[in-house]
Image: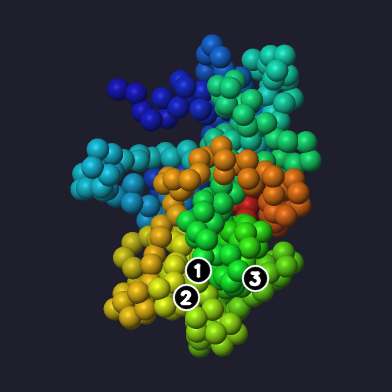
């Protein structure tokens, strides 16, 4: 019986230097064989990949919380059930990558063609030629921009779609000034809001938000964020808030912040039980709506190609900063150091890997 890793190698989804998350909770870089190209494929050498600060980190460490590690996903009924976990170690993960064609090139896809994708942290990956064609990095965007075109920026655009027309003409609030929150906040500012307020507990991250032209609120101890924002814009001023941190305490703050019958777009990945969430309080008394904007459930009016096309348009027009958001780049052989650095969010917004 082949392992999940063997299957990935055979399909060309990993090859060469590859980041692994081990059962011990540690991270390393391991060299895997490179399978021959299949008909219609091109090989891409990764130039840059970036670590997801949300989903990916839930697989790391002795106390990893991702539900796929503890339950089985029943795809027929779309529920988690007890049983053998859906994911086994070692885990090779990642969905923020960019590289260049090095093998299987054609006239339409010459060697050196720059492409983006949501492949894993791996040195060499095989892509269908038609996928590589669709995912070429446009002139004017860098590899550092490219790592976020496949998944991270579309996550933000999907959140905007779930906000709906209520977003236009009024102020909005984004909880969490991580990479996702900063992208969502920038996209909200291009979508007709009168102002975007970004909330975080880290002053260093709010400085980044300010550099993007966004207003900020420091959520320090003893600060009632909802009351502070309602003092600024009025009790009925905020129709939509985005929760992008994955904290259920922040989700509670978002519920408290929106107006009566307001909308909270839940973008974060919430782990474990919902500590600090009180559904009998403002959620109940103000009739607040919570919409999940998880990227596995794209808004019905959009598709992944249309989400990507929109964020590319905004990035090319200088209205969305992707690669310009601060990140520290590590050699892929130092992946363990990169993951360790991610555990200190006050000094590091995001980490990238170079190959």
Q: Which residue is mark 1?
A: 240
Say which residue appears at 70% left-offset and 66% top-offset: 208
Q: Point out the frontmost of discs 3 and 2.
A: 3
In this rendered view, identify the residue nearer to me: 321 or 173: 173
The residue singled out by tag 3 in the image is 194
Helix, strand or loop status at disc 1: strand
How far apart, in angstroms, are the residues tagged by discs 3 and 2?
Answer: 15 Å
Residue drawn at the location 74% of the way across and 25% of the way down: 112
Q: Where is residue 8 shown, x and y percent of the image?
A: 45, 27
The image quadrant where one finds the C terminus is: top right
Q: Residue at x 26, y 48 (%)?
A: 80
Q: Choose the circle earlier in sequence order: 1 or 2.
A: 1
Q: CA distance from mark 1 to mark 3?
A: 12 Å
Nearer-N-terminus badge (3/2): 3
Are there few (<14), some (14-19), or many (20+) residues within 10 Å of tag 1? Answer: many
Q: Tell whether 293 sits left or right of 184.
A: left
Q: Name which of mark 1 and mark 3 comes first in the sequence.
A: 3
Quadrant of the rendered image containing residue 74: top left
Whether 128 is drawn above or below 31: the answer is above
Q: Out of 227 and 46, give the one closest to the viewer.
A: 227
**In the shown orientation, is residue 282 left or right of residue 240?**
left
Q: Which residue is mark 2?
A: 258
115 w.r.t. 168: above or below: above
**Residue 134 location, x and y as percent?**
62, 29
Q: Are marks 1 and 2 in contact (CB under 8 Å)?
A: yes
Residue nearest the viewer, comparing 148 with 346: 148
Where residue 311 appears, as percent x and y from the top left, is 64, 47
Q: Are marks 3 and 2 in contact (CB under 8 Å)?
A: no
């Amino acid at each position: 019986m082949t392992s999940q890793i063997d299957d990935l190698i055979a399909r060309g989804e990993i090859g060469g230097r590859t980041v692994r998350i081990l059962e011990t909770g540690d991270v390393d870089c391991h060299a895997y064989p490179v399978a021959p190209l299949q008909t219609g494929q091109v090989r891409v050498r990764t130039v840059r990949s970036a670590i997801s600060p949300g989903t990916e980190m839930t697989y790391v460490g002795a106390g990893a919380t991702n539900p796929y590690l503890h339950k089985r996903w029943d795809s027929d009924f779309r529920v988690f059930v007890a049983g053998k976990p859906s994911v086994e170690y070692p885990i090779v993960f990642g969905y923020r990558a960019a590289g260049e064609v090095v093998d299987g090139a054609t006239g339409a896809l010459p060697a050196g063609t720059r492409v983006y994708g949501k492949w894993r942290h791996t040195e060499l990956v095989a892509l269908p030629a038609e996928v590589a064609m669709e995912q070429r990095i446009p002139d004017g965007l860098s590899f550092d921009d490219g790592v976020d075109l496949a998944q991270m920026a579309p996550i933000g655009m999907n959140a905007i779609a779930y906000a709906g027309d209520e977003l236009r003409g009024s102020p909005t609030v984004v909880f969490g000034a991580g990479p996702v929150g900063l992208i969502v906040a920038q996209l909200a500012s291009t979508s007709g809001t009168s102002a975007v307020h970004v909330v975080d507990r880290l002053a260093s991250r709010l400085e980044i938000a300010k550099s993007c032209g966004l207003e900020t609120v420091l959520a320090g101890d003893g600060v009632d964020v909802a009351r502070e924002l309602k003092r600024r814009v009025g009790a009925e001023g905020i129709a939509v808030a985005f929760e992008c941190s994955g904290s259920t305490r922040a989700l509670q703050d978002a519920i408290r912040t929106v107006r009566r019958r307001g909308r909270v777009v839940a973008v974060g990945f919430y782990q474990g039980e919902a500590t600090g969430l009180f559904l009998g309080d403002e959620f109940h008394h103000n009739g607040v709506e919570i919409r999940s904007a998880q990227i596995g459930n794209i808004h019905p009016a959009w598709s992944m190609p249309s989400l990507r096309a929109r964020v590319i348009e905004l990035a090319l027009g200088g209205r969305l900063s992707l690669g310009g958001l601060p990140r520290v780049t590590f050699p892929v052989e130092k992946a363990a150091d990169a993951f360790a650095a991610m555990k200190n969010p006050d000094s590091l917004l995001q980490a990238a890997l170079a190959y």
